[in-house]
């Protein structure tokens, strides 16, 4: 255990508590009391704010800790606040590495009130010593002084200077004090973290830096491309673009290995004549560059339409005026157009690039997912669309500035089948992270979130979904789907055996906390012998609170549920473990609203361990050999890769610990496979649903606690181990192809991690065509 001290304000408001180590941490034998060994991927200490009547206040804090490596491994600490329910701001705060004195020092900003904290010394397996941890609240002026200080913490990138007081004052005149402070903090973060070689930067150096051999391979691909060479018109709207970034943007197009392109630049009446001078300079020396200057400022949508009017290619691609393309970006797009002739929209992975050209924060995306696109503009960069399609839907719409691309994508995919939207799992686009840009903070353009919500709302109206949209923070959205009147009857099937303390919590929480009322509770007793359990089951029957069925056969999870479903009356089925505890009253309504949507199969929920860490946020195939729950052990509120843990999305599989599915879908695939007695029956069921044409969906808005496997125990006997091995082998033989390439995952992400860590090496070579 480690002391944790929190000081609020300048007065003597000092709280002391203990940081608790998670299960992947153990004491180092023979070391002092502060010595630890990390045995997992995301070792962490956690602390729940129990000493305060309310949550830890939002605001600026000075963080200090004593952290030493015991085996010469560089440490990369981070702080993960869990914001109070109702807020989903960016959680993980990357801290600078310890200095030579073993001290970690950093100014941190909690955007909202904090209910819990998690402190991680790094990732991977290593030994370390953690001393006292202190968190001291500071005022805005003290925080600003720290941000403007030239050096702090002994970590400064190559002489990079802090923003001066004069520049801050000038920035305040242009952006206001809040905007200038946000820019100063962004500069501060780049400065104090700049020499922390993130795992992504190392990965880029090893696997995604274009070498001479890689360039030669790409040139050979381009030379042998063949006669079918689509002309790609790149749309580039500009306005007051700083010269440095505009030149780098244009030159990133000129450096393209694939030469059949057209650059269509539309300037939105920039007051600075330098912008047009630069554009004209490039156009004069390259006939592939066309440009127009608008007479009056019309903002991004109208300017993009002006660029679209210049396009002559069969395809258009979207580029922001301060971003950059990879040299092989258009080659990859053209190759996919050639190899997948039915595609009408193609998108790639992306990352961000700081002022010094360092790449960070990649988004390795899933294949096309309409639910995820409704929840966030995950397609974003780099995207190419058939020009005819873009014109058919009306191009870019005024009134959606800031989310004009999201609006365009939604209107396009409404006319496409999923197979007509292609994904290239490679980073082809660098989003420039300039202070004030949404690449650094979604808060930089609040209007974009409003526009995105309107885009999703219009999409739902056009498609006749009857659903409504709710704006979350940071460019994310929740779609609320309608439930007909009368609401369909749901049969909640709960297998159990003894362990009345678990069953009682499960049943009472369902009956008392569920706002959706048209359900029947079907409890299946699989051979209980405990008198107290039998008495409780009898009381449920006597009070007509549940239907209790007796199933006196050897335990087989699949067979029990299949048998119970035959006795149940509902047109919607919910498979529920007896160790589930309801948290959110609208959990069932949320899950039913998805299950009754046409084409939806199984619906999964967000499950937490009782210690407020994630137990289930969806299942990814291939991890640990067959499949695993993602983000298991991360704190409640953790955003996930690309913020995906915040929004509804498609998943290849979800857990049957809490799964809702229509009876029609359940019976269409024959229910659960009774050859899978304990493990993987839910995964197999979901995959068979997918094979039959259904989409499985996971939602973070149905929340429950899960006391995992508390009533069944562990695989701790020879018989159980043999049975488990057989189930693993069955899954691998039946689903070998999809287990390696889950469409809800990405081949650049590891099959040895539940946390979307990077695959080493990537499972598709960077400089060769990805197999279709």
Image (cartoon, rainbow, N blue to C red):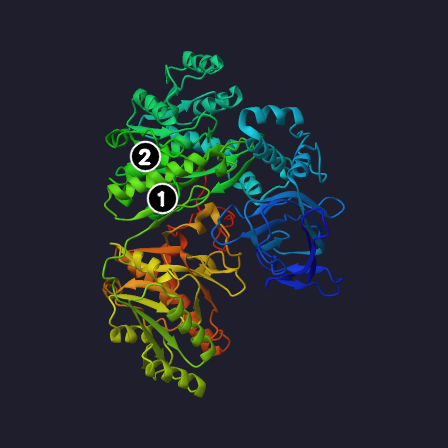
* Quadrant in which the N terminus appears: bottom right
- What residue is drawn where x is 42% and y is 87%? 529
Pick the front one: 292 or 700 = 700
218 vs 106, left or right, is left
Separation of marks 2 and 1 at Cα, in angstroms: 12 Å
The residue carrying pointer 2 sits among few (fewer than 14), some (14 to 19) or many (20 or more) residues within 10 Å by Cα, namely some
| Side (left or right) of 401 relative to 7 | left
Can residue 196 be seen? yes
Above/below status of 755 relative to 511: above
Residue at horizontal 37 percent and vertical 36 percent from the top:
451
Please report contact status of discs 2 and 1: CB closer than 8 Å, yes or no. Answer: no
Instruction: Name the quadrant containing residue 544.
Output: bottom left
Residue nearer the viewer, 34 or 772: 34
Q: Which label was assigned to residue 201? A: none
Residue 516 image position (x, y, % from top left): 33, 63
Q: Nearer the viewer, residue 220 or 72?
A: 72
Residue 224's spot in the image, x, y percent? 36, 30
Q: Counting residues from the N terminus, which is met first, the one under dot 2 or under dot 1?
A: 1
State which quarter of the image contains the C terminus: top left
Q: Residue 715 location in percent, x, y?
A: 48, 74
Q: Name the one closer to the observer, 57 or 587.
A: 57
Say which residue label 2 marks. 408
**Which element carries disc 1, helix, strand or loop?**
helix
Numbered disc 2: secondary structure: helix
Q: Please say whether residue 369 is visible from this viewpoint.
A: no
Q: Relative to residue 256, is residue 574 drawn left or right? A: left
Residue identified by numbered label 1: 373
Crowding near pointer 1: few (<14 within 10 Å), some, many (20+)?
many
Quadrant assignment, res 225: top left
């Amino acid at each position: 255990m480690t002391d944790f001290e929190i000081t609020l304000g300048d007065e003597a408001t000092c709280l002391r508590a203990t940081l608790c180590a998670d299960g992947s941490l153990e004491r180092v034998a023979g070391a002092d009391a502060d010595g630890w060994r990390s045995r997992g991927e995301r070792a962490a200490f956690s602390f729940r704010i129990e000493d305060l009547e309310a949550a830890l206040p939002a605001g600026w804090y000075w963080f200090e800790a004593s952290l030493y490596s015991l085996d010469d491994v560089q440490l990369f600490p981070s702080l993960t606040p869990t914001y109070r329910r109702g807020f989903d701001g960016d959680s993980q705060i990357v801290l600078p590495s310890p200095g030579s004195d073993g001290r970690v020092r950093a100014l941190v900003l909690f955007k909202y009130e904090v209910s819990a904290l998690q402190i991680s010394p790094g990732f991977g397996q290593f030994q370390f010593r953690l001393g006292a941890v202190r968190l001291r609240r500071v005022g805005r002026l003290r925080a600003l002084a720290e941000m403007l200080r030239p050096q702090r913490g002994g970590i400064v990138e190559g002489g990079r200077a802090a923003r001066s007081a004069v520049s801050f004052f000038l920035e305040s005149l242009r952006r206001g004090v809040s905007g200038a402070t946000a820019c100063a903090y962004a500069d501060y973060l780049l400065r104090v973290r700049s020499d922390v070689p993130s795992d992504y930067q190392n990965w880029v150096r090893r696997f995604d830096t274009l070498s001479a051999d890689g360039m030669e391979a790409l040139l050979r691909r381009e030379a042998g491309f063949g006669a079918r060479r689509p002309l790609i018109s790149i749309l580039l709207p500009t306005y007051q673009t700083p010269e440095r970034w505009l030149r780098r943007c244009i030159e990133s197009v000129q450096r393209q290995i694939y030469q059949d392109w057209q650059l269509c630049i539309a300037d939105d009446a920039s007051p600075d004549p330098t912008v047009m001078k630069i554009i004209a300079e490039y156009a004069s020396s390259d006939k592939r560059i066309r440009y127009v200057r608008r007479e009056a400022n019309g903002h991004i949508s109208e300017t993009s339409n002006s660029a679209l009017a210049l396009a002559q290619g069969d395809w258009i691609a979207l580029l922001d005026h301060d971003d950059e393309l990879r040299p092989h970006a258009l080659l990859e797009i053209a190759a996919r157009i050639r190899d997948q002739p039915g595609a009408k929209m193609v998108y790639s992975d992306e990352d961000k690039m700081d002022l010094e050209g360092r790449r960070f924060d990649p988004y390795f995306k899933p294949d096309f997912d309409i639910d995820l696109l409704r929840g966030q503009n995950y397609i974003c960069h780099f995207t190419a669309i058939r020009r005819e399609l873009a014109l058919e839907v009306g191009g870019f719409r005024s009134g959606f500035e800031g989310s004009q691309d999201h609006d365009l994508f939604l209107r396009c995919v409404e006319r496409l089948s999923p197979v007509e939207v292609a994904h290239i799992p490679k980073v082809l686009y660098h989003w420039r992270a300039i202070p004030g840009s949404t690449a650094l903070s979604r808060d930089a353009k609040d209007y974009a979130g409003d526009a995105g919500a309107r885009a999703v709302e219009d999409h739902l109206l056009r498609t006749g979904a009857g659903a409504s949209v709710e704006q979350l923070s940071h460019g994310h959205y929740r779609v609320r789907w309608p439930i007909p009147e009368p609401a369909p009857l749901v049969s909640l099937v709960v297998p159990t055996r003894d362990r009345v303390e678990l069953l009682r919590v499960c049943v009472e929480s369902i009956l008392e906390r569920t706002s959706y009322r048209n359900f029947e509770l079907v409890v299946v007793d699989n051979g209980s012998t405990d008198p107290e359990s039998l008495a409780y089951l009898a009381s449920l029957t006597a009070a007509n609170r549940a239907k209790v069925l007796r199933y006196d056969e050897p335990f087989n999870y699949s067979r029990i549920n299949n048998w119970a479903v035959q006795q149940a009356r509902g047109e919607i089925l919910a498979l529920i473990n007896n160790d589930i505890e309801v948290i959110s009253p609208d959990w069932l309504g949320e899950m039913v609203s998805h299950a009754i949507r046409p084409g939806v199969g199984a619906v999964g929920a967000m499950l937490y361990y009782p210690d407020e860490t994630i137990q289930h946020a969806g299942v990814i195939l291939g991890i640990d050999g067959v499949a695993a729950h993602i983000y298991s052990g991360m704190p409640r509120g953790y955003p996930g890769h690309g913020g995906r843990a915040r929004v509804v999305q498609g998943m290849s599989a979800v857990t049957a610990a809490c799964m809702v599915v229509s009876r029609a879908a359940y019976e269409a695939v024959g229910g659960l496979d009774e050859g899978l007695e304990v493990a993987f029956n839910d995964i197999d069921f979901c995959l068979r649903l997918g094979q039959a044409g259904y989409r499985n969906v996971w939602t973070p808005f149905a929340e429950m606690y899960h006391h995992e496997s508390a009533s069944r125990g562990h695989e701790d006997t020879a018989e159980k181990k043999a049975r488990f091995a057989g189930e693993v082998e069955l899954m691998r033989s039946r689903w070998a192809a999809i287990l390696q390439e889950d469409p809800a995952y990405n081949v650049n992400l590891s099959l040895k991690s539940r946390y979307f860590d990077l695959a080493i090496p990537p499972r598709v070579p960077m400089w060769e065509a990805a197999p279709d």
